[in-house]
Image (cartoon, helix red, strand yellow):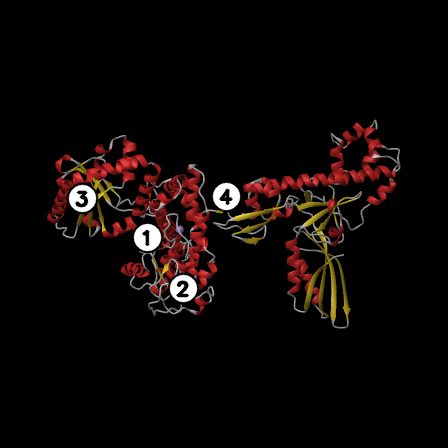
Amino acid sequence: MATNPQTQTANAPAGTLASVSAREPTPDELAWTGDPLEAPITIEGVPPVDELLATMRSYLPDADQEIVRRAYAFAARSHDGQVRKSGEAYFGHPVDVAFLLTRLRLDSASICAGLLHDVVEDTTVSVEEISKRFSREIAEIVDGVTKLDKIKFSSREQKQAENFRKMLVAMSKDIRVLLIKLADRLHNMRTLEHMKPDAQRRIAQETLEIYAPLANRLGVGWMKSQLEDLCFRHLYTDDFEKLNTEVGRRQSERQAYVAEVVDILRNIMLEEGLQHASVYGRPKHLYGIWRKMQQSKLPYDQIYDAQGFRILVDDVRECYQALGAIHTHFKPIPGRFKDYIALPKPNRYQSLHTSVIGPGAERIEVQIRTAQMHRQAEEGVAAHWKYKERGDSLKVRDEERFAWLKQLLEVHVGVKDTDEFLDSMKIDLFSDEVYTFTPRGDLKVLPRGSTPVDFAYAVHSAIGDHIVGARVDGHMVTLRHQLRNGAIVEILTRTDAHPSSDWLEFVVTSRAKTRIRNYVHAEQRERALLVGADLLEKAFRRVKYSVVRAQAHERFPKMLAHFRIAVWDELVVAVGYGKVDAADVVENLLPESKVEETKVEAKPSKRVRKSTPAGGPAISVSGFDDVLVRMGNCCAPVPGEPIVGVVTRGRGITVHRRGCHFVLDADPMRRLDCEWNSDSKSGTTVAVRVYSENETGLLAAMSARFTEAGLSILTANCRVIDGHRAINDFEVVVQNLAQLQGILASLGRIRGVTRVERVRA
Ligand code: MN
């Protein structure tokens, strides 16, 4: 990546930018807007980039600083002129987010993504541009954060909150996306007072239900506590103020006591030979105390362990040693000892917790942990995210991305406090669901493989019935496009559009399948009704009678009974479907009339076969089993091939290959959907043509292939053209498409055979 480390002082441009440093622009940057290049940049009230770099250097000396510098400058320019509700420069927000990320010791790509996280959402800059200017990795993280931003959590239902958290995890292919989202939310919560009161409540509620638990699950202790306290302040303002005052007062009252306890604990550690142990008192976070008060229904002054003490030691052995020493000096309170070292919490938190009767007979809580456990408790998942700065690009494979979360699941098999979130996350990581969204941000959980059609029916059946297209994340997709996690799906509808039976090939939800089938059946019944009425009308007209007179005929009820049909419409449908021959209806009602004319027309040609040999009907017509079906002799469809039925006057339904010219020419009203019955044993005669050299033995080789495939040859016709080439025509009966394709391939492999094809009439 071409970077220019050269920096120099430049004059401050007019406007909000107060520039102090600049470097030579890259050609790419010059091409950016065509404007005179704005110099990077510090903005009033926003920490300068050097401060951010210094913080990052403190834990990542090798980090790519130049890219962070560029991201800072680029984000500053992109947000130039935008202000937050507080009136401060908008750019202060991404910079503060970046600082929060340094507290998690994240890599330079994350810091850049933090700086750029609102650029795509709030400015005209595209993800592609970020990819070009910085890196694909950074662009993908920014894209992930942008997508999470688009999703609004609306429902107060527990189930929804649960789903929402699952979805956030599922969507964040990169855990850094979640961490940036948490930092973003934390900063927004810190500046929440500039929002309108109802927005404050909504955002605080969402944070308490979604993001604070998420921070906890990811093991980022300080974020969880800060988020909870900020929510507490905005949601239960009176309680918060009261408790805050009380805690403050009591803390100053108790400073002497806290100092005394710290002193005593320190001495105990020294006596134990644990010179490195650091001991300190720590106020618990307010929301935690408040919840304890709610649960125990006690006032604040009776919550004893509101003040906690913490001891950091060098290793696990020392943790237990320190615990033993404390229990020797002070009486432990039964039931309060917890060994999270042997049994870590689901978020991998480790510590020893104990409460003892301390100096002055007061209950105190002590936490003992190693420095590494402390880092784990503060940074959580971030502590486990290994980065490679410089050199090789970061290669994080899928399984590595979720290694921490998977570990998190495995460690806790059999542990009681593995909660529902983890269970659901387990489902998530290994299951078959995709999380998709309406443009308004409503979550739709669908089976993996779902398409826009499934999505449309999940939203509303009327939307599914009229879908004509879909946009996923702003791009047009086909209806059979498989949706992925996080897809924002916009369905395009047209009032005159209708479901198609073709959709049944790719939809996966039963809701969509049922709706499409119902529609197709209803539509086909409608068609059968029209076709049947037409056929009957013509059949009666041939004997100088009419349908209207027929319905008034005295034998009419008897005739219906003969066909075991209750009402006229059903008979018309049966005729339309070809189940009943119109001529038979006429003959039954008017036995005295002459109907030979229709009979002649109804006589099938000799190559048309009935499809009901032993083994049941080979074909079912849109769910009806007992329909009279014949094979079209023009295309001779083979079981397994896509087929369409065409209602033929007086001959029931003829089945053709989809795409056969006969089907294309037929009145669309007469087309019916047909399917092969997989258990059918009937075969189809097909013609196969083999082009070959004129060599002896080739014919024998061909017939051997037929025998091997278990096919018997009905006819063979071989002839030589222009002396050295031969055309060999065979007719064989095949059971299905696979068998046909098998023999065609097998024939093609014979040496001397130049081409093999299926011949259609
Ligand atoms: Mn933001």
Contact? badges 4 and 2 (CB < 8 Å):
no
Q: Where does the N terminus fall, quadrant-wise? A: bottom left
Whole-percent x, y for residue 554 in the image: 83, 26
Q: Which residue is mark 1?
A: 100
**Residue 353 figure quarter:** top left
Q: Is residue 752 above or below residue 278?
A: below
- First of labels 4, 2 by sequence position: 2
Amino acid tagged 1: Leu
Q: Which residue is mark 4?
A: 444
**Residue 75 figure quarter:** bottom left
Which dot, 2 or 1, sits closer to the camera?
2
Q: Which residue is mark 2?
A: 38
On residue 199, which mark appears?
A: none
Q: Which residue is mark 3?
A: 323
Which dot, 1 or 4, sits closer to the camera?
1
Whole-percent x, y for residue 35 in the image: 45, 65
**Label 1 – label 3 distance at C-alpha:** 33 Å
**Residue 613 figure quarter:** top right
Amino acid tagged 2: Glu
